[in-house]
Amino acid sequence: MALELLVIVASYLLGSISFSVLFAKFLKGIDIRQYGSGNAGATNTLRVLGKGPAIMVLVLDVLKGVVAIWLGTWVGGWGTWVAAICGIAAIIGHNWPLYFHFRGGKGIATTIGVLITLCLWPALLAGVIAILAIFITRYVSLGSLILVALTPIFLLVIGFTQPVLWTSIIIAAFAFWRHRINIVKIVEGRENKIGSKVKGGNRVV
């Protein structure tokens, strides 16, 4: 029990490492949460810092989810509640990071890492549809929501284990909550599209 608790806490602390904030501080001496969309994630890193840093942030944030699942698997076994909770803990850490006053990103990159490790093929299928949606609409937020909404549906159809299915549902709930403002903006046609630039160095609202 103590070891299980340890890996869950370790997963949260790992998730709390905000690479977007660190890269922006190191490269430009700024707090990225004060620029662009104000989000500490790969998409806003692209908007504020450019492609190179954005790719690095994306890869590292995905790896946080992968490592968290493997930590839980090491202790509890494959597809168990321990592994699932470690994944959720990493996403919580990304969204509400201990090291950065609990102001983080929206957790999608880390979610991708969690889902592709827990359930590769359902997540991959949902991801293909999400990428197509992003390509057509240029709304990253819409693609993110499609990814997390479709994954539990595919898991239900295929019949994955309960821990994995419920984890995907919890993750989807997190994602929709974190994107609630984006959802309103999409409906109103005000959502920022991928590739949009920072205007005047201030936050885009």
Image: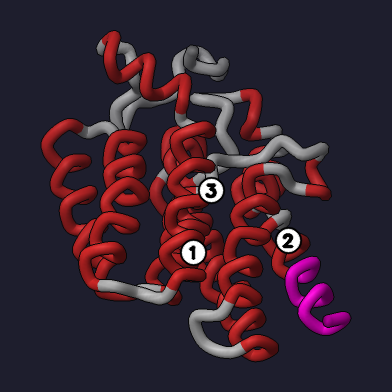
x and y, in percent, of residue 93 in the image: 69, 53
| Residue numbers of the magenta segment | 1-10
What is the chief secondary structure element of the magenta stretch?
A: helix
Q: Amino acid at mark 3?
A: Gly
Distance of label 1 from label 2 (alpha carbons): 14 Å
x and y, in percent, of residue 22 in the image: 69, 50
Question: In front: 70, or 138?
Answer: 70
Distance of label 3 from label 2 (alpha carbons): 12 Å
Distance of label 1 from label 3 (alpha carbons): 9 Å
Q: Nearer the viewer, mark 1 or mark 2?
A: 2
In the visual, does 20 lie left or right of 194? Answer: right
Residue 2 part of the magenta-drawn span? yes
Image point 52% across, 74% down: which residue?
66
163 up-or-down from 30: above or below = below
Reading the image, the residue beneath label 2 is: 12
Q: Earlier in the sequence, mark 3 or mark 2?
A: 2
Question: Mark 1 Cα within 10 Å, few/some/many (few <14, many 20+)?
Answer: many
Reading the image, the residue beneath label 3 is: 107
Image point 66% across, 40% down: which residue?
104
Q: Nearer the viewer, mark 1 or mark 3?
A: 3
Which scheme is used to colour this image of the protein? secondary structure
29 up-or-down from 204: above or below = below
Q: Amino acid at mark 1?
A: Val
152 up-or-down from 48: above or below = below
Mark 3 secondary-structure assignment:
loop
Query: Which quarter shows the N terminus?
Result: bottom right
- Say the numbered circle drawn on residue 62: 1
Question: Mark 3 Cα within 10 Å, few/some/many (few <14, many 20+)?
Answer: many
Mark 2 secondary-structure assignment:
helix
Q: Amino acid at mark 2?
A: Tyr
